[in-house]
Image (spheres, rainbow, N blue to C red):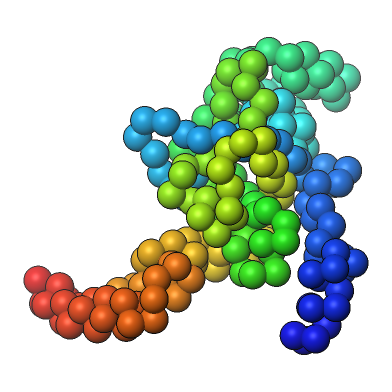
């Protein structure tokens, strides 16, 4: 595998070097990334309104049907919604955000080869002037992203199977491994001795916390 990666990936011939998740698939998109300011959640990504509406068009259409829209009226309403924040669609997206039903996975090539695909809870930016993907600076070390025009693709995980697989991509490259409680991630970018000491400390305090 190492020889294959060296020959194909690092010479930019492998399929994993291409812009995965940024084609014409209806549940994908690609945007320039910017940072989130204020109170932040490193597990959240903020997507543009137009991208959210286009990626979730089927789900929004079903919501319009439940509201009594005819197919033709729903189609026209969805086309208009791409250019303005509509109350009906906004209420639907806000409910999905609050219930955390919108999940997305993102990465920067060729970071997907280094296990840095990360799952995010998706929030929608209501500002139509902002077309960027917004992520927390705490979530970008493994992407080597510095907000100087870097782009990232995002793939929306909308079915139960893709969501279940995405849960394993939460924060695995951050300091605390969210998939293994009381363990520091090996991809946190620290020397091995630091990781060993931190994990020993976490292991030592775990029984005390369990007894409380």
Which residue is depicted at the point 58% across and 18% down? 127
Figure quadrant of residue 78: top right
Query: Is residue 103 visible to the viewer in this orientation of the structure?
Result: no
Residue 19 in the image: state x and y as whole percent.
Answer: 81, 52
Q: Against 194, is 150 above or below?
A: above
Which residue is depicted at the point 80% across and 47% down? 22
- Pick the residue in front: 122 or 76: 122
Q: Quadrant of the C terminus?
A: bottom left
Q: Against 133, is 104 above or below?
A: below
Figure quadrant of residue 55: top right
Figure quadrant of residue 17: bottom right
Total labels: the figure holds 0
Q: Is residue 16 left or right of 146 when viewed as pictured?
A: right
Q: Is residue 146 left or right of 80 when viewed as pictured?
A: left
Residue 5 in the image: state x and y as whole percent.
Answer: 79, 78
- Pick the residue in front: 114 or 81: 114
Q: Quadrant of the N terminus?
A: bottom right
Residue 123 in the image: state x and y as whole percent.
Answer: 54, 36
Q: Against 112, is 90 above or below?
A: above
Residue 152 in the image: state x and y as whole percent.
Answer: 68, 45
Which residue is depicted at the point 81% across and 65% down? 16
Query: Is residue 51 visible to the viewer in this orientation of the structure?
Result: yes
- Pick the residue in front: 93 or 61: 93
Which residue is depicted at the point 33% across and 82% down? 193
Q: Against 23, is 32 above or below?
A: above
């Amino acid at each position: 595998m190492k020889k294959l990666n060296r020959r194909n990936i690092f010479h930019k011939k492998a399929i994993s070097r291409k812009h995965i998740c940024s084609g014409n698939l209806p549940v994908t998109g690609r945007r320039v990334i910017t940072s989130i300011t204020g109170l932040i959640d490193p597990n959240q990504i903020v997507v543009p309104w137009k991208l959210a509406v286009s990626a979730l068009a089927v789900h929004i259409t079903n919501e319009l049907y439940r509201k009594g829209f005819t197919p033709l009226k729903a189609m026209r309403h969805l086309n208009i919604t791409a250019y303005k924040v509509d109350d009906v669609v906004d209420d639907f997206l806000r409910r999905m955000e609050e219930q955390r039903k919108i999940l997305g996975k993102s990465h920067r090539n060729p970071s997907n080869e280094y296990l840095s695909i990360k799952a995010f809870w998706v929030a929608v930016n209501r500002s139509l002037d902002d077309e960027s993907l917004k992520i927390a600076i705490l979530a970008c070390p493994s992407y080597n992203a510095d907000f100087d025009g870097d782009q990232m693709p995002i793939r929306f995980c909308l079915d139960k199977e893709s969501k279940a697989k995405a849960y394993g991509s939460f924060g695995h490259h951050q300091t605390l491994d969210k998939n293994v409680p009381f363990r520091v991630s090996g991809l946190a970018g620290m020397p091995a001795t630091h990781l060993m000491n931190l994990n020993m400390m976490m292991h030592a305090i775990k029984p005390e916390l369990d007894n409380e």
